[in-house]
Amino acid sequence: MPAFLAKVPAAPRDYSACSGCSLCLLVCPMWRSSHDPVFTPEGLAKALQCGATASELAAPIAACSLCGACDPVCPERIDLSGMIMDLRRRLANALPSDSPRPALLDELHARLQQGAPATAPVASRSVPVLLPGPVLRSDPALMAQVQALLGIAVFDDDGDDIALAIEVGVEIPQQRLHAFLDSLRGHSIVAADGLLLRQLRRWLPGSQRMGLGPALSTRAAVRSNLAPSDLYVIEPRAFHGDYERMVGYYDRLQRETGCSLSLDLQRIAIPASSSGLEHRLGLVPKRDVLRGVADDDVQARWLLQGRTPARIVVESLADRAAFGRVCDLPVVYLAELGEDPEMMKKFRHAFG
Amino acid sequence: MRRFFFPGYYSSPASKRTILLNIPPVEPGTVGPCPVAPDALQGIKRQQTNPARWNGAGWEPFVATLRAAGLDLAEGAAACGVYLTDAGGTACGLPHGVVLARSAGQIALLLKAAQAHRVPVTVRGGGLTTEGESVAFGGVLLDMTGMSRVLAIDAAALTVRTEAGIYWHSLAEELRRKNLDYLSAPLNLTSSVGGTLGVGGIDVNSARLGCSADQALSLQVVTPTGDVVECSDDENPELFQRVILGYGQFGIITEATLRLRPYTPLAMHYFYYSSLRTAIEDLQMLDRNDASDYSGILTIMDCAVNLLVAFDSAEREAAFRANWKSRLRGHGELGFGLCMAGHYALRPWKLREALYLLQRKRAVFPEFRRAEYMRDGKMHDRTVVFSRAVWKHWGSRNMVIPDLAMPADRFVEAVERGNAVCRKYFSHYTLYCVGIRLRPEHRPHYEMSCIPPGAEGWVYGCEFEPMIEGGVYSRDHFQAFKNAIYDIGLDLGGSYYRFGGMMKGYIRRVFGDELVERHLAMKRRADPAMILNRDVIF
Ligand SMILES: Cc1cc2nc3c(=O)[nH]c(=O)nc-3n(C[C@H](O)[C@H](O)[C@H](O)COP(=O)(O)OP(=O)(O)OC[C@H]3O[C@@H](n4cnc5c(N)ncnc54)[C@H](O)[C@@H]3O)c2cc1C
Ligand code: SF4
Ligand code: SF4
């Protein structure tokens, strides 16, 4: 067959390919709260085309929540969230070593240099493992519930330092990265952090991976407790990082349960929160610099506008807080809905 | 140092002197000598260029006035870079500064200061023009998308009041939560309401519902001298008539009240033709008989033409099946595939053409059936599907889309001649044809617009879209192509969707001196310093 007839996914392109169609802007939470094209992936790509430097673009680079919504809509296949992560790395590298830095960054550097924590051995390479992330870890009761539902081992080294480094633009020492990836090789992975999951897709291409949200929603007990009056809020990073498959998965979920999904007309997951870098680094966002972009509740309000669900079901614990601030509706974390061990087999298609 | 695109000038690196090329200056507020008129052809190239960049006189005091009034204006590459060009990508220019629209009051203040200091203001919505109409060659760029709120939806009266910078898609997102929809809008997610009401707006239902501009019931407009005025067919009708389809010459639309309808998904049918003429005849037959809710033509190649027909309700679809389907001369996908296979089997020397057709089919057809945009066999949002497909398969950093708007009886001839022009200039191209139903009571709105003078009933529009496919073409090539298409319109008494910007030389030839002079006089009265959207029309 001639090469041009073969369905080979084309490689992602860089900002120079941006045609200015603005499709990415429509889905970007920065745009929704600022209505300022500078705070959009298109604005970044166009400014780079005009020779703007990373430091001139520091405000939008910091305000981006890395939700990944812009990636699947770009018709030029520009890896936009990858571009922003790259700009963050450039900004971080350009920072003089003696400049004042948030305490969290120093801590992160130290952890990355230290290497992996001692990991309790997991029985066999083929068993699925859970990378819960720090938020779930900090709630042992909920973590136990998740584990009971999924029936899988928790991986001690869940790579949360690596996930944070990716997000804030810190270089990951090769030794630390290889140790982490080697320990994961051969396992099926369930990860709570959508950004880490996206990177694992690139780093461990042959592996089976799944977001914690889809993993939990495969459980019969969870599914059977989803009702048509529920608004089901998808964790956007894992969804957009594996868009083609995930959009099919959630369509099936919707058909089977009748719940409504947090998708827009382009079938992009509307992020319920839009915290950028400052938030991640534990800093107070500078509202004047970000021209209003730091208003995290705009997204949650937009998700609810014109909808009247009886209950909100969230895949991400961070979203629970966002909805809690803007409405009186019951907000339930997916794992709180129930348990069943048989369904994971049935829904193997949700693994990639 | 900031670099600006500065047509007409360049710096000699050796001498560091600025050399003025021999281009006659044109005073703002005049329509210059027509560079495409037959008597203008001797000795000069038959093409147009960007207008000259505004020289910046008075910028500093102007900015000081704005800042003293608390108005935000951003300067520098990070703020201005995004506005370098429009969707066409062939006209490039940077503003001196950018203002994000936030309210009618803020815009009024901006325009008053601009009149006083004679600073040009270029208004931009989605920036989907292709002739540089929404590109600022110096001065202020006013980005209307900062005004993107839906103000009130009246589900009982089926109307919406919205800020005019909103993208049609963002409006659709809000309306859909109430199971409502707008009537018709460009098949493009990122054109704005204000930008569209100013130029037309054609949808695949325009043969039934008219153009987007026809659905505006009333507008809030900031006049070029900074007055905030409400207008409609009953209130300030002259202003309404000039602002609707007025290319932003007579005021900035800040709010609009639009008609709505209940939302319905679409049942799509596709018919394939090997003759463009037959497909157009069938399209016009359907439109005349109100046989479908949506209709349009998209060509893949001259010998592979797709007529799309769609319905809002099962009843309309059933009536079509019963009364009209058998009269269409097109085939279904399978039947057409077999015809094509036979055609190329007998012409093995056309293998390359057959492979191209196969490749386009494989790439493009699935876009119109993507599972995520279909429910129970129906298309859930036509604009999402079409716009994504258009940008993916036709979009690039350069888009050259000349068009013709013709009275129904001259449409076939115009399209066939346009097709021949496409063949001459490009290896591959696509045509997109739709009908636009005219509203007799809106005749005053149509004056000097994309609706051809004197047209009645339906006007048919055709966009000629060459596939750039990574090819490198000179601007001269693009411009010569556009001129050749526009000449057809001129010859056959048509008009154009994009007659502004780089194509403004056609205005006098299409509309005649008397009408153009009358509009120019109105413009001079409305905009004494000629600052608003300079060089788009006047
Ligand atoms: C890929 C592609 C597909 C397209 N498909 C279609 C289609 O299917 N149907 C169709 O009808 N058109 C189509 N177009 C053309 C385009 O949609 C129209 O030109 C569009 O409606 C303009 O809207 P905009 O917001 O982008 O306006 P802009 O390009 O920003 O502006 C258009 C003009 O109006 C002025 N203007 C902008 N906002 C205002 C305002 N608020 N008040 C006063 N003046 C204003 C500008 O100065 C400019 O002169 C397409 C264009 C492209 C590039
Ligand atoms: S990743 Fe999300 S927040 Fe960042 S630019 Fe893309 S859409 Fe906007
Ligand atoms: S979607 Fe892609 S091509 Fe379009 S504006 Fe955004 S970055 Fe540019």
Image (spheres, rainbow, N blue to C red):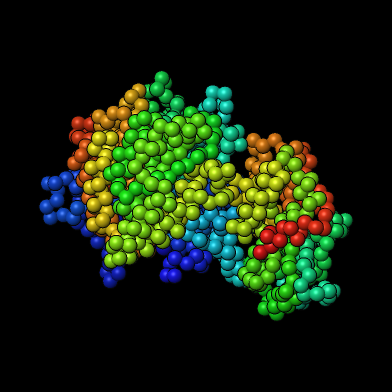
Vertical arrangement, residue B359 with respect to residue B188, above or below? below
Residue shown at the point (58%, 43%) measured from the top left: B376
Residue A89 appears left or right of B466: right
Residue B160 percent coordinates (x, y): 53, 30
Quadrant of image for the N terminus of chain A: bottom left
Q: In terms of depth relative to the viewer, which is nearer, A118 or A332?
A: A332
* Outermost residue, bottom side: A175
Residue B273 percent coordinates (x, y): 34, 48
Image quadrant in which you'd find residue B442: top left
Residue A45 visible somewhere in the drawing:
yes
Vertical arrangement, residue B418 with respect to residue A244, above or below? above
Residue B198 visible somewhere in the drawing:
no
Vertical arrangement, residue B282 with respect to residue B41, above or below? above
- How many numbered badges does the structure rendering display? 0
Residue B144 appears left or right of B32: right
Residue shown at the point (56%, 58%) measured from the top left: A71
Q: In terms of depth relative to the viewer, which is nearer, A124 or B286?
A: B286
Residue A133 percent coordinates (x, y): 77, 62
Q: In terms of depth relative to the viewer, which is nearer, A342 or B212?
A: A342
Q: In terms of depth relative to the viewer, which is nearer, B120 or B50?
A: B50
Residue B17 appears left or right of A163: left
Residue B386 percent coordinates (x, y): 46, 47
Residue B504 appears left or right of A281: left
Image quadrant in which you'd find residue B3: bottom left
Quadrant of image for the C terminus of chain A: bottom right
Residue shown at the point (54%, 31%) measured from the top left: B262
Residue shown at the point (62%, 53%) measured from the top left: A247
* Outermost residue, top side: B234
